[in-house]
């Protein structure tokens, strides 16, 4: 099974998981980043990825929110392209690994589906740690689930470094609302998203509306952030090597004891 799993990861990624262009936001009112292309540094690093970015890139995503809001259906629509109208409660947690190729680089998302039922909360919260993305989900047709999203987010944030996760607020079951109803709920949701510093999306797992767009956007933001972090780490390593060199240069200049040149000038 292990062998199969590894072969699976080595095979080419599905054609509809290839991202070239930076995916767009849903609404400018609650959007994490305004831009339509990858960071130049990231693009360059992706082009020379063999030299600089080694290893299997994987980011953790956790999906939280009240029971019955449609977390499992949202994940299943994207990962398996299916929709199940029968409700089966998530017991504790479940996860999917979704493979992408972004700007030419293989990339994986580990998507954790957590249970909304109160009795599973302590099991589920054990999986919140180390989330690069937190998705708080509510049901557009059930306004009290929107009110609960702040609490869900707070619980997820407790387990993570401040400012280390991208936050999304997602309203599901868009198909159940008229255009006017949807707009009304959206404007409430956008206010909450702004308070949460989250990006807002309305989706339907039933019809598939905005599902792929949402996951692509999330994957691209998470990918870019992890590439930037990696580049920063590489730069630090290079800087440290540089420091070492400077110390030896200092030594040389001290040993030469040329009194007209202060030793520290060689730093620049
Ligand atoms: N009409 C419609 N129904 C949906 C949609 N998404 C989910 N549902 C229905 O809502 C119910 C709950 O969906 P789930 O995905 O199981 O909900 P959940 O948030 O994972 O629930 P827990 O696992 O208990 O936390 C199911 O009966 C789904 O068929 C949607 O986009 N439109």
Image (spheres, helix red, strand yellow):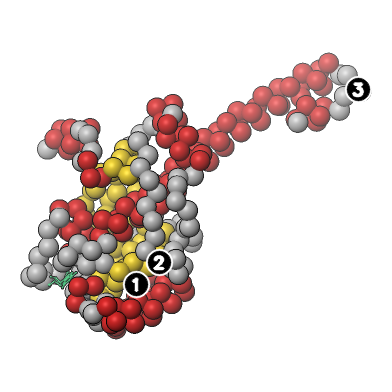
Return the residue nearer the eye: 178 or 59: 178
Disc marking residue 259: 3
The residue that disc 1 covers is 152
**Mark 2 Cα-neighbour bin, 10 Å: few <14, some 14–19, many ≥20:** few
Q: Nearer the viewer, residue 259 or 89?
A: 89
Label 3 SS: loop
Residue 145, picture quadrant: bottom left
Disc 1, SS: helix
Q: Nearer the viewer, mark 2 or mark 3?
A: 2
The mark that comes first in sequence, 3 or 1, is 1
- Disc on the earlier residue, 1 or 2: 2
Residue 168 tag number: none
Q: Is residue 66 visible?
A: no
Which mark is nearer the camera, 3 or 1?
A: 1
Picture layout, residue 39 above or below residue 68: above
Asked if the residue under mark 1 is in contact with the one under mark 3, i.e. CB atoms within 8 Å, the reply is no
């Amino acid at each position: 099974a292990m062998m199969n799993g590894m072969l699976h990861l080595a095979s080419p990624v599905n054609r509809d998981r290839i991202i070239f262009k930076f995916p767009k936001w849903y609404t400018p009112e609650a959007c994490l980043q305004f831009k339509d292309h990858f960071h130049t540094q990231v693009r360059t690093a992706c082009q020379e990825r063999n030299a600089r970015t080694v290893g299997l890139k994987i980011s953790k995503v956790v999906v939280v929110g009240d029971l019955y809001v449609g977390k499992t259906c949202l994940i299943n629509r994207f990962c398996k392209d299916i929709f199940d109208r029968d409700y089966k409660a998530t017991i504790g947690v479940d996860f999917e690994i979704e493979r992408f190729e972004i700007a030419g680089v293989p990339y994986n998302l580990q998507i954790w589906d957590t249970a909304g039922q109160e009795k599973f909360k302590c099991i589920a919260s054990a999986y919140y740690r180390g989330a690069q993305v937190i998705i708080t989900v509510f049901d557009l047709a059930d306004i009290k689930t929107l009110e609960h999203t702040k609490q869900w987010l707070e619980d997820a944030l407790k387990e993570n470094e401040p400012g280390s996760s991208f936050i999304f607020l997602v309203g599901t079951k868009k198909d159940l609302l008229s255009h006017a109803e949807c707009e009304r709920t959206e404007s409430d949701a956008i206010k909450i998203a702004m308070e949460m510093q989250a990006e807002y999306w309305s989706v339907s797992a039933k019809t598939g509306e905005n599902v792929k767009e949402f996951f692509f956007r999330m994957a691209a933001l998470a990918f870019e952030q992890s590439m930037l972090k990696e580049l920063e780490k590489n730069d630090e390593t290079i800087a440290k090597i540089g420091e070492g060199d400077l110390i030896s240069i200092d030594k040389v200049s001290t040993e030469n004891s040329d009194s007209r040149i202060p030793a520290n000038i060689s730093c620049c």
